[in-house]
Image (cartoon, grey):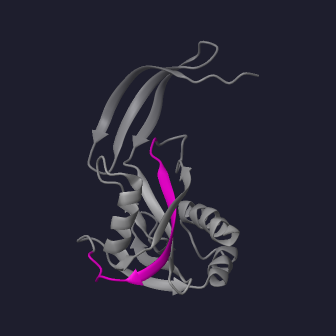
Amino acid sequence: MIIEKWRKLASKYLVREKWATLRVDTCELQGGIIKDDYYVLEYPNWVNAIALTEEGKVIMVRQYRHAADIISLEVPGGVIDGDEEPEYAIKRELLEETGYSFKTCKFVAELYPNPATSNNKTFTYVLTGGVKTHEQHLDEHEILNVEEYSIEEVKQLIKDNKIAQALHVAALLYGLAEVEEN
């Protein structure tokens, strides 16, 4: 069977906020079926990093995540600001969240967090040669701890289901494969 893209007939915005926008689309599906209430979340694009220190330790951050009501161990990253290039955004986010600067930066993956209901992308980078050059410069709502782990410890954390953020597990799988390949 050939799968065809849906044709958007109309859109109506229900919420337009800085961090999320909700719209409802009316679409014509293949075969002529009309779907008149397809909800789409529009978010800004994100970046995340598999960031290694000069000693080869993986930099992780631990912070509270309100929607899930968990204290979460994650890779560093954040929102791409406006027309900012993803590579610039990840370097900025790392400097702000961790205070580390890096010698190399390589793009490794572009993923959709949930293409069924949201339209944004996450860009994943591997950065190496990290050195602490600055103090953290966190947003007013950010409280996070910077932690370092060996690659083997990170693999065990994944095995033990200790990293709850699915996009960050995916980033680690892509990033660690890239690191081990080189």
**Segment colored magenta:** 119-137
* Front residue (pair 61, 57): 57
Tell me the residue at 67%/66% (across/down).
177
Above or below residue 60? Residue 166 is above
Say whether residue 73 is left or right of residue 82.
right
User: What residue lies at 58% left-to-right and 24% top-to-bottom?
Assistant: 5
Residue 128 forms part of the magenta stretch: yes
| Quadrant in which the C terminus appears | bottom right
Q: Residue at x 68, y 24 (%)?
A: 3
Considering every residue shown, the one lying at the far left of the view is 140
Q: Is residue 127 magenta?
A: yes
Residue 6 location (% of width, % of height): 55, 23
Which residue is at the far top?
Answer: 32
Residue at 43% x, 27% y is 25
Where 72 sits versus 90, above or below?
A: below
**Up/down of 51 relative to 21, above or below:** below
Quadrant location of the N terminus in the rendered image: top right
Q: How many marks?
A: 0
Q: x, y (%) of residue 4?
A: 63, 22
Which quadrant would residue 115 be assigned to in this image?
Answer: top right
Q: Position of residue 65 (x, y in %)?
A: 41, 69
Q: Is residue 125 above or below residue 7?
A: below
In this rendering, position of residue 132 left or right of residue 157: left
| Image position, residue 157 (x, y; %) | 63, 79
